């Protein structure tokens, strides 16, 4: 996000310099404006190497014996706590449960359910919300892709 902000601020500065440099009363030194534009373009291009463009993936889905009323989805990196999907964006099958709460905790998506899980197969699916601010995503805005019903490691024995 800092790289994007730098580009925006650099664009504003370049535009202001170009406008003033093009006015004859201000000296009309468009060559100076070109040099400044080249400098800011170089800075913006350099900053893009710092941008996070890696899309988070789901690396695990599990139910722990110590938390039988919670299904945990683990992402490959930390997720943005400000972007919490609606509980309806997830579907649990195998052992159908109503999801009552969704919490983002670092790389973990914690789905609290209405009744504890028991021994047996469980799957979970995720569909991205139509509202971008409700999609699972990392701090840079890279969004977790929707996924179909996928097996959950059920630690309940």
Image (cartoon, rainbow, N blue to C red):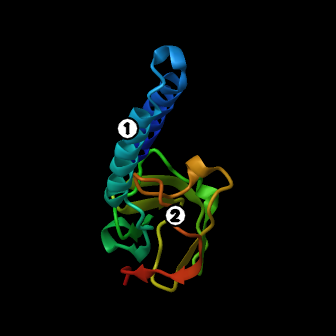
> Which residue lies at the image location 61% right of the left edge and 72% below the top edge?
96
The image shows a total of numbered marks equal to 2
Which of 63/105 is in front? Answer: 105
Viewer can see residue 9: no
Assign a secondary structure to mark 2: loop
Q: Quadrant of the C terminus?
A: bottom left
> Which residue lies at the image location 47% right of the left edge and 37% below the top edge?
11
Tell me residue 39's x, y (percent): 34, 44
Residue 85, numbered label: none
Tell me residue 123's x, y (percent): 55, 79
Which of 26/11 is in front? Answer: 26
1 to 95, vertically: above or below: above
Residue that extends furthest to the top in the rendered view of this protein:
25
Label 1 crowd (10 A; few <14 / some 14-19 / many >=20): some
Q: Which residue, given by chain and number where applicable, does mark 1 sit on?
A: 36
> Which residue lies at the image location 33% right of the left edge and 60% below the top edge?
49
Q: Which residue, given by chain and number where applicable, does mark 2 sit on?
A: 115
């Amino acid at each position: 996000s800092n790289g994007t902000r730098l580009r925006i601020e650099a664009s504003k500065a370049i535009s202001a310099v170009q406008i003033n440099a093009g006015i004859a009363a201000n000296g009309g030194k468009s060559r100076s404006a070109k040099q400044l534009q080249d400098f800011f373009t170089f800075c913006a291009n350099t900053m893009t190497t710092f941008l996070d463009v890696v899309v988070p993936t789901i690396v695990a889905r599990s139910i722990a014996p110590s938390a039988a009323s919670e299904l945990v989805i683990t992402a490959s990196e930390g997720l943005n706590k400000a972007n919490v999907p609606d509980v309806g964006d997830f579907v649990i099958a195998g052992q159908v449960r109503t999801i009552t709460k969704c919490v983002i905790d670092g790389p973990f998506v914690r789905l609290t359910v209405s009744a504890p899980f028991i021994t047996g197969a469980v799957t979970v699916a995720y569909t991205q919300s139509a509202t971008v601010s409700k999609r699972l995503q990392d701090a840079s805005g890279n969004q977790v892709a929707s996924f179909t019903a996928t097996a959950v490691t059920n630690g309940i024995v």
